Amino acid sequence: MTSPPEPTPDTRSADGLLSSLPRALVILLCAAAAVVVFAGVQAAAWLLAPTFLALVLVIAMAPVQSWLLRLGCPGWLTTLVLVICVFGGLLALAFGIIVSVAALATQLPRYTNQAHEVADSFTSWLAQFGVGPEQLRQAAGALDLGKVGGMLASLLGSIAGLASGFAFLLALLLFLSVESSGVGDRLASIGADRPSVTVALRQFARGTRRYLVVTTVFGFLVAVLDSVALAIMAVPLPITWGLLAFITNYIPNIGFIIGLLPPALLALLSGGPDRMVAVIIVYGALNFVLQSLVQPRFIGDAVGLSTTVTFLSLAFWSWLLGPLGAILAIPLSLLMKALLVDIDPRAGWADALLRSSPKQLDAAEQAALAGRRKARRRRYLRRLRRAKPAVSEPVS
């Protein structure tokens, strides 16, 4: 009696299984999986956002460690310098934010009377168009800058209450900084099995550093110019608003609008509508031109993402991870591009939609483009050095 033939094993690959399904079903399955992943990321935002922030900070400071190693410094010294640089920058930024919020909380209650006068004049102006004066007076009476100062004081207390989360971030930074010296060996091990992954991760690190350098340079320039302009116009707390402009510069496209609102409001209370209009004009001339016209071109060239993609990434990561996602929108998009697009040779269509240049450049064109970027940066730095005396002249 012959035994029945053994069943033939299913040797179809995952691609074969997917290709046998209807395209509409594949799209629905992918969309459902994406929804589940997004929900998980949103639930773990308290962990993922600080972790990625620590990773970005270590990536930004890693060239310092590499430079010291090339000079022949011992490994423990390079790690110590990296830890000091990362911790020092983060602590200085946190201290500046806390001091600025505290100064604003003490400054606002002084302008309660001016706020009521502005509100009364505004209600009188609206009454000319038939708007009910009684409702407007109630709304004006509800305006109390003392309450706003109390809210800021409570915000300051909540910031102090984040000590545990900040301690977690500092500990994570310490561990990442200590282990950063072995990243090259780890990438080499990955490259032996998956060379495309190593190339994509190195491109992510380079793009992140370029983005941070460009954004920091423009943010510092904008902060200095804004502080000088606000000091000339006698707007209170000019250094605070300069620090705010520096921080909001890391938020793509709409950062300057967020940095404009508080100084414009304080200019209205301290000097009237004319001073507020002057602040808006100065911010529009400085911040809009630099942050919305010039800087996106440099960022697009530095990271290889189109302006539309940077704006959409801001909205997406802000929704997914909160305010920290807005600051980390570009590095997060670069990481997703590296892991989902750059390592997959079949994802060329996605790269064509994401990259800043309409067509894919060959090696010679990329080298020529890099040369033009360096020449443009050198010309810009020369113009900036020539313009420094003119900028510092009003302060003296």
Image: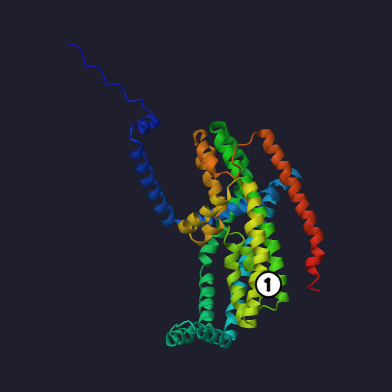
Q: Which residue is painted at 54% across and 86% down in the image?
A: 121
Q: Quadrant of the N terminus?
A: top left
| Element class at badge 1 | helix
- Residue 45, horizontal then vertical, whole percent: 46, 57
Q: Position of residue 388 (x, y in %)?
A: 79, 63
Is 304 left or right of 19, judged from the image as shown? Answer: right
Residue 221 picture quarter: bottom right
Vertical side of 276 occupied by 302: above or below: above
Task: Please report the residue visible at 63 percent of the width from the left and 36 percent of the height from the top.
Answer: 361
Q: Position of residue 135 (x, y in %)?
A: 42, 85
- Where's the C terminus, which quadrant? bottom right
Q: How many marks?
A: 1
Residue 196 picture quarter: top right
Question: 164 or 201: nearer the eye?
Answer: 201
Q: Visible in this render: residue 73?
A: no
The residue carrying mark 1 is 239
The residue nearer to you, when weighing 291 against 161, is: 291
In which quarter of the view is residue 201 placed? Answer: top right
Residue type (three-letter) at the residue carrying disc 1: Ile
Q: From the viewer's perspective, is residue 134 above or below residue 262?
A: below
The image shows residue 148 at horizontal and vertical percentages of 52, 79
Query: Which residue is most to the left?
Result: 1
Image height check: is 142 above or below 175? Answer: below
**Residue 290 visible in the shown view:** yes
Q: Relative to residue 136, is residue 210 drawn left or right?
A: right
Q: Is residue 171 above or below residue 242?
A: above
Q: Residues within 10 Å of mark 1 (few under 14, many from 20)?
A: some
